[in-house]
Image (cartoon, rainbow, N blue to C red):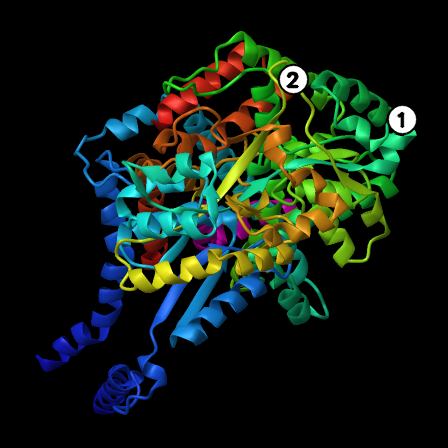
Amino acid sequence: MKEKYYGYIFVGPAFLYLICLMMYPVFNAIFLSLTDKQIGIFTYSFIGFRNYIELFNISLFQTALINTGILVGVTVFVKYSLGLLFAITIINLKKGFQAIRSIILIPWIIPISLSVLIWKWMFDANFSVVNYFLSKIGLSAVSWLGSPVWARISVMIVNIWMGLPFFTIMLSVGLLTIPKELYEAAEIDGANGFYRFLNITLPQLKSVTLVVLLYSIVMTAGAFEIVYILTKGGPMQSTHLLGTMAYEWGFKGLQLGKASAISLFIFPVLFVCVYFSLKNILKEGSDI
Amino acid sequence: MNKIVRMLFATTMALYLGSFVFAGGTNEVTVADEKKEITFLTQTHYVEGYDEQLQKIADEWAAENGMTVRIDFISRDDFPARLAAESSAKSGHDIVFLWSYAPALYQDQLVNLDDIAENMEKNYGKWSEAARKINIHNGHWKALNWYDQIALPTINTDYWKEIGIESEVLNEMTWEDLLVAAKKLHDKGHPIGFAFNDMDGWAPLNQIMWSYGAYFIDESGKISLDTDQMRTVIDYVVRLSEYMPDEVHAWDGGGNNRFMLSGLGAWTVNTPSIKPAAVKNEMPIADKFEMTLPPKGPEGRFVDSLNVNVGIWDFSPNIDESKDLLSYIFNPENMKKQIEASHGYNIPAITYKDDQVYEYFSGDEYLKHYMKLGDKATILPSGGIAKPGREISIIFDMKIIPIMFGKAVRGEPADDVIKWATKAIQDLN
């Protein structure tokens, strides 16, 4: 009997941390999103879901929602594809596998704000090293941060550069766990490389794939730092994501209620993603 | 094994919790522990060396009064969030930097400063009209106008000479004259430019708008974007932008500076921070920079004044001491030091009786137009003729008007951008 209580004592501190530092802000945000609370005005009223409904009338919200969707869709696909390619390449290296795996981690371990600042300089209008190299190969300079289209692409480039190591490492670990016998048996049966990739590699990577995709979708949907530092949502508010829009509307627009609604808007979608992904992951685990 | 794990856990928790008990130090109270600390949140100044001078002034006051002063310097862009956090939590610094219309926004949480404002006027000199407009609410001074940031055109004289224009001529130019000159400069590979996606965009756009009689909010508080004057200005800015690099839409607060310091730019509108940066870094281009008056329009010549203010939170436990510190910072001797340390960037909002305060301006040819600027141009706060308040603060911080012009420059019709800006203002209020 006493053993049981030790379990509660052990998880107690972590549970308290979760409640105070993570759940409280979430519940507070949910509450604020149902009010018309503004900074500098002490009285406010409960207005139900009006904030959420009014969001659809705001053109910047439409832009931010589309940008967030495109960012998640494009970057997660590219990160997964390139990550798998790099993972397959590095595990087949005869020498230097460990060293290269460590180097690949560098974008992941550099603090986000530092790496985005470096990218900002690389894309700078006057001093862009990227444009310098483009000019050396006969291409014209790109207005990386001055054009709405290229600014969106710049945000994606930085996001992919920072997230790729995570995909590469996780998928390489996943690849290493696939039994070699499966490939040998398939080879004996006459299966070519592409067939083995489709029917052995990808299915065997299902659990790892679900984990990395889930993590990346959640993190990318909530992205803030890259846009905040690189473009501040510009030019002309064209690169705003839901996170940066919530920040602007909350702290500069003073609309705490609406800002909370913006930041929580995508929560149901992410919740569904998390639910079904975890269900599948746990199912995979129990099948094993 | 279970017993060992339990013992390890219990020991670790005891050490962890016990550290909180001992973290406060010993029971022995030292003289140092009794010193009060005044905290001051302000922006990291754009001119290197100013922050150190401000800290020095604060330390002198602290030494005289047996206290300590901690000044926290943060980026201008971080202020909206920081002020919102401190006001919501009713916890934070004693004295806070309040730029532009923030005193109107937080007036209910700021201490009345009537006593020290009146005292300063009696002893130091007269407050400007803008200082009163921005800081007096419901009959009380809620903050003090510390200094003004006024942006004037900065030129590279060599490039203007290439098209046959001496710098003195620029002081008599109209905006249409600038358009003609900008084309010639652009054809020679020397573009002009100012920001559209940053707060720096407000100054040149306000100068142009007001000189054509266009205001985004009128005196009664009504949105006044849908006017012929505003359409004229939008058309003008679109034409002027043809002689700017595309990258102006990506500029941040340092974009103007980098544009000129790189040797690319011929004209921009900025506070006097460009030449000091060039001089500090011993750049040969430093000698080429001059500041001029802004061009005139049909309604005259206008200048935008960004008021930098300081206030004291009503939850501060050190209100009297904070007031005393502010009086010390504002005294003529210390204001003179601040002007020198900022290389003339800080324009005092008080017209000091002591002319020595302005010694730096009269000694530097680069800053000559800041002397008696009110005689040469109409100076308005960034919101123009609108009454300071919450709405203006939001429009200003959200950069609605620079973004509106940016959209027009990018090819959107004037009617569409006016509609967009009107809706954006309505959505936020």
Q: Which amino acid does label 2 sit on?
A: Gly
Q: In the rendered structure, does residue A202 fall within the stretch colored magenta? A: yes
Which percent across, then down, holds residue B294? 68, 28
Q: Determine whether the residue tagged by mark 2 lies in a helix, strand or loop.
A: loop
Question: Dot 1 falls on which chain?
Answer: B
Q: Residue at x 47, y 33 (%)?
A: B396
Q: In the rendered structure, does residue B229 fall within the stretch colored magenta? A: no
Q: In this view, does B39 lie above or below B164?
A: below
Q: Residue at x 72, y 52 (%)?
A: B276
Number of residues whose C-alpha sits closer than 10 Å to that of mark 2, classed few (under 14), some (14–19) or many (20 or more): some
Which percent across, then down, holds residue B85? 34, 51
Q: In this view, does A229 lie above or below A90?
A: above
Which percent across, then down, holds residue A266? 36, 37
From the image, tell me which residue sits under label 1.
B163
- Quarter of the image where the C terminus of chain B is located: top left
Q: Can residue B283 be seen in this view?
A: yes
Q: What residue type is labelled 1?
A: Ile
Number of residues whose C-alpha sits closer than 10 Å to that of mark 1, classed few (under 14), some (14–19) or many (20 or more): few
Q: Which residue is drawn at 54% across and 60% down?
A: B334
**Figure label count:** 2
Instruction: Name the one closer to the observer, A201 or A84.
Output: A84
Q: Residues in magenta? A: A194-219
Q: Is the magenta stretch mostly helix, strand or loop?
A: helix
Instruction: Name the one closer to the observer, B242 or A221.
Output: B242
Instruction: Name the one closer to the observer, A21 or B319.
Output: B319
From the image, tell me which residue sits under label 2.
B297
Q: Determine whether the residue tagged by mark 1 lies in a helix, strand or loop.
A: loop
Label 2 vs 1, first from the N-terminus: 1
Q: Residue at x 57, y 20 (%)?
A: B209
